[in-house]
Image (cartoon, grey):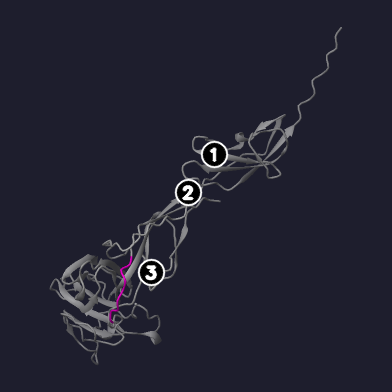
Amino acid sequence: MCVFLPPQKINLLFSFLLLGIAGFSFTEINTSYSPIFTPATDTVTVCGTSTTLTTTPVSGYANPIWNNGTTGTSLTVNSSGDYWWQVTGTNVVTNGDFTSGNTGFASSYTYMPKTGTPNALYAEGTYGVYTDPSALHNGFSSFNDHTGNSPANKRNMLIVNGSSTANTTVWTQNIAVVANTEYVFSVWVSSANSQNPAQLQFSIDGSPLGSAISPPSTTGSWQYFTTVWNSGGSSGSLPIALVNQNIVASGNDFAVDDIVFAPVYRQNVHVVLNPIPVLTLTGPHSACGSYDITKTIVGYDTNTYNYFFKDTSGNTITNPTVTLSGNYTITEQSKATGCTSLPVQTTVTIIPNPPKPGISSL
């Protein structure tokens, strides 16, 4: 049994906050979007070790995703902390999943098509678009794109042999943006070689955005990175980009997939999980005449807890000193959090006091 305090929402209509939430390791041409509000943080307070968070519908926005990269309308969390979910409008990136091959974007790297042998990307500063990194370089691991999970479902990804020159643009595309609108910029990245993982950077109109993006060294392990950008007074066509900051020639090989730049609604949720008290009773007990059932409570502490008592019939009793035999139920409630223990039962047997002997006068 627990007490649940529902989240209180404060919607700040038509105001915009640059969230600046960077990479977490922790869906084609732009249409017109109305400015969308960014609400204040919800607070969810729950008694227990976990709770399930859920999204709410936002008109014109879909594809819910959570801060850990999982999708769907709900997320079960097992610790207190800060979480978020977001829904997006239409992705304004052309060929963000590279299904159409080497088209719709530009790069400062040199494009190299697949050859008959797996050596197309031997040189640093080159890239290809294909279904398997090992087909373009025999030193790269073999794995599927972010959404592919079987040989029959293989699809393209951007495969890169990292340049040894900092701030080299791996991928860029000019995007029409609307003023005063929140956008999400996200990407899935995986290492193709375990040595010296890439250090990518989101960039908009030549300015870096968010923290460095560094995938795990485990090859084929796709990781989601995202940041949020507010257009403010900017509008029209702006270049968005992924820039590589790693200048190490050895390793620095990676794959990129499912790039998204879209108007976004993001809801922050602060979760507080309070422990449920654990009540322990001793018993059974017997006593002559009456018995104080608070004596059955291990660690009885009225400064920290409230206690509630019920008799055998389930009726609430206010006086814990009982005069009838039976099974008595006690629950414990934290005064600080309102969280209540499970009810625990103890058995008490009352032995009648013997009658006083009669006294006769002489």
The reply to whether discs 3 and 2 touch (Cβ–Cβ < 8 Å) is: no
Residue designated by label 2: 275
Q: Position of residue 122 (x, y in %)?
A: 19, 83
Q: Is residue 161 visible?
A: no
Which secondary structure is most common in the magenta stretch?
A: loop
* Location of residue 14 by image quarter: bottom left
Up the image or down, 164 lies above or below 132; here it is above
Mark sitting on residue 65: 3
Range of the magenta residues?
29-36
Q: Is residue 89 left or right of residue 293?
A: left
Q: Earlier in the sequence, mark 1 or mark 3?
A: 3
* Location of residue 145 by image quarter: bottom left
**Disc 2, SS:** loop
Up the image or down, 113 lies above or below 336; here it is below
Q: Residue furthest top?
A: 362
Residue designated by label 1: 306
**Disc 3, SS:** strand
Q: Position of residue 71 (x, y in %)?
A: 41, 70
Image label count: 3
- Amino acid type, residue under disc 3 in the picture: Ile
Q: Is residue 334 visible?
A: yes
Q: In the image, which is nearer the foreground, mark 2 or mark 1?
A: 1
Q: In the image, which is nearer the foreground, mark 3 or mark 2?
A: 3
Up the image or down, 31 lies above or below 78; here it is below
- Amino acid type, residue under disc 1 in the picture: Asn
Q: Residue at x 81, y 19 (%)?
A: 357
> How far is the residue under mark 3 from the one under mark 2?
28 Å
**Disc 1, SS:** strand
